[in-house]
Image: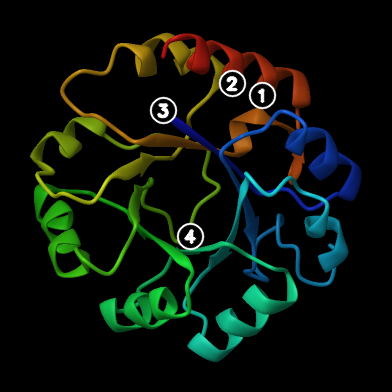
């Protein structure tokens, strides 16, 4: 199962986390988030991240021009779209050679069906807890909703995942996420990841391969 750690912005914390070799590291480019890298994190910090880790920029309803500019400046490998972005924008970004992850915030089975028009223009979907603040709630949604997902696009499970969920994730059978996305439940402060908690979580999840 892939492991994505999201929401870092401190240079030393980023360096220590990258040494754990998560599959994806997510950086937030949304100025209303307390974890935003904008105006805080020097692009050079991301240049030291090992090449095998997918550097992912998280955007909320940004323009294609802004996303492409940040992708170039920060040398991003992937883009996560966490707002109401269109399939056309996903297609545009893929044409630039970027991986695309599109987030959905399901409250019902109808929300799961909304993924269908994005099939073919995204590398992954990401299912997260509904929130007016576009993430970072630390709360779970009803994972049982994902039983109705029948699409071919693999997905990340996100929203309130915490260290104690390791055994639950290892035993998931009815839904089969390609990966998990962790954030606020693994922090000592907003944007500062607890390295020891993440180390144990990664080791536990990878030991289950």
The way the protein has been coloured in the rendering is: rainbow
Residue 141 in picture, x, y percent from top left: 32, 37
Please report contact status of discs 2 and 1: CB closer than 8 Å, yes or no. yes
Q: Residue 100: name its quadrant.
A: bottom left
Q: Height in image: 73 above or below 196?
A: below
**Residue at which label 2 appears:** 202
Residue 185 in picture, x, y percent from top left: 60, 30
- The numbered disc on residue 1 is 3
28 left or right of 152? right
For the residues marked 3 and 4, what is the alpha-carbon distance in whole angstroms?
Answer: 24 Å
Q: Which of disc 3 and disc 1 is earlier in sequence?
A: 3
Q: Which of disc 4 and disc 3 is earlier in sequence?
A: 3
For the residues marked 1 and 3, what is the alpha-carbon distance in whole angstroms?
Answer: 15 Å
Q: Height in image: 68 above or below 192?
A: below
**Residue at which label 4 appears:** 134
Given this view, does label 2 or label 4 mark the residue nearer the observer? 2
Given this view, does label 3 or label 4 mark the residue nearer the observer? 3
Label 2 CA crowd tier, 10 Å (few <14, some 14–19, many 20+): many
Quarter of the figure with the C terminus: top left
Q: Residue at x 65, y 57 (%)?
A: 27
For the residues marked 2 and 3, what is the alpha-carbon distance in whole angstroms?
Answer: 10 Å
**Residue at which label 1 appears:** 198
Residue 208 appears anywhere in the view = yes
**Residue lying furthest right:** 12
């Amino acid at each position: 199962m892939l492991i994505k750690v999201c929401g870092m912005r401190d240079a030393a914390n980023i360096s220590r986390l990258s040494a754990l070799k998560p599959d994806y590291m997510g950086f937030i480019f949304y100025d209303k988030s307390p974890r935003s890298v904008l105006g805080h994190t020097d692009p050079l910090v991301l240049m030291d991240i090992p090449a095998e880790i997918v550097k992912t920029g998280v955007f909320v309803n940004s323009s294609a021009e802004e996303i492409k500019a940040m992708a170039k400046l920060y040398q991003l490998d992937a883009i996560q779209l966490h707002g109401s972005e269109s399939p056309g924008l996903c297609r545009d970004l893929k044409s630039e050679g970027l991986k695309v992850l599109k987030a959905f915030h399901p409250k019902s089975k109808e929300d799961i069906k909304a993924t269908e028009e994005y099939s073919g223009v995204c590398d992954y979907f990401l299912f997260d807890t509904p929130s007016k603040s576009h993430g970072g709630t630390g709360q779970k949604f009803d994972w049982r909703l994902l039983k109705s997902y029948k699409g071919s696009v693999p997905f990340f499970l996100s929203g309130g995942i915490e260290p104690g969920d390791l055994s639950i994730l290892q035993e998931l059978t009815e839904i089969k996420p390609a990966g998990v996305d962790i954030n606020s439940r693994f922090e000592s402060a907003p944007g500062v990841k607890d390295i020891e908690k993440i180390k144990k979580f990664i080791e536990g999840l990878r030991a289950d391969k």
